[in-house]
Amino acid sequence: MSALLQVFYKPGELFSSLPDRRRAWLMPLLANALLGCAIFAVEVHYIGFLNIVRQQLAALHMSAENMEKALTQAAAPARLYSSCIQTAIFVVLASLLIAGILKAFSMMTSRSPGYGAVLAMVAIAQFPYYLVALLMTLLILAIAPDPTSLNIRNLIATNPAAFMDKETMSSGLYSLLESLDLLSFAEIGLLAYGFGKITRSSFFAGLGAAGGIWIVYVSIKMALSLLF
């Protein structure tokens, strides 16, 4: 864990050492999965699992009858635990996917590290994001007069969409503004820096790779919001 904390005060040294370290991806990947579960647990504690499900279903414009059936199913304890496990799995799969794409980009550089080193870099670069998200989520929900009234989809107001009325603007534009997030940009910057270090390329090469992934993600997200 002490090595993982180096990302806050010696990120360059930490990233540069990854190609020579074995299984360096294991601890940060596990830490991120646990932080993802912790964020979910904090939201459930303050907002309530059924309230979270109700907000998610309302965003899909589900009929009252179908929503009631879905809420009845969500009331089962097994659904709560499975949602927590799904959150951890999503965190891991997202890291695996991003690492795979960045590995492909690394083949265009002078030094292409192994997939394990790239995965370790991605997981370490994501660690501050999940840690800050957990602390901010806990702080916001702890001081909120009525946590159940908060929008679970945009709980941390670090993007323009948090200050917009979703009902009065197009879903595509709202999705775009929601993606212009300060925490996400900080993560992209750290991914770009880490990519440059492990491939011995420039920061801008890493920014092109990480930024390209973000642009594709935002485009898909906007398209889905327009379709559904």
Image (cartoon, rainbow, N blue to C red):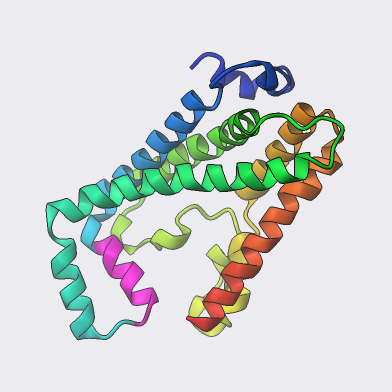
Indicate the quadrant where residue 120 lies. top right
Question: In the image, is 113 to the left or to the right of 132?
Answer: right
Q: Name which residue lies at 51% across and 76% down.
A: 166
Number of callouts in the render? Answer: 0
Q: Name which residue lies at 23% across and 55% down.
A: 48
Q: Is residue 180 magenta?
A: no
| 185 or 104, nearer to the observer | 104
Examine the rendering and report whether any part of residue 146 can be seen: no
| 145 or 108, nearer to the observer | 108
- Residue 172 against residue 144 in the figure, above or below: below
Question: In the image, is 39 to the left or to the right of 45?
Answer: right
- Residue 10 against residue 148 in the figure, above or below: above
Question: In the image, is 186 to the left or to the right of 144?
Answer: right
Q: Predominant secondary structure in magenta?
A: helix
Task: Give the x, y percent position of residue 101.
Answer: 67, 48
Task: Give the x, y percent position of residue 54.
Answer: 27, 69
Task: Give the x, y percent position of residue 121.
Answer: 63, 31
Q: Name which residue lies at 65% across and 33% down.
A: 118
Q: What stretch is highlighted in magenta?
A: 51-61
Task: Give the x, y percent position of residue 182.
Answer: 64, 50
Question: In the image, is 204 to the left or to the right of 54?
Answer: right
Indicate the quadrant where residue 205 lies. top right
- Residue 131 against residue 104 in the figure, above or below: above
Examine the rendering and report whether any part of residue 85 can be seen: yes
Q: Residue furthest top?
A: 2
Q: Name which residue lies at 22% across and 47% down.
A: 81
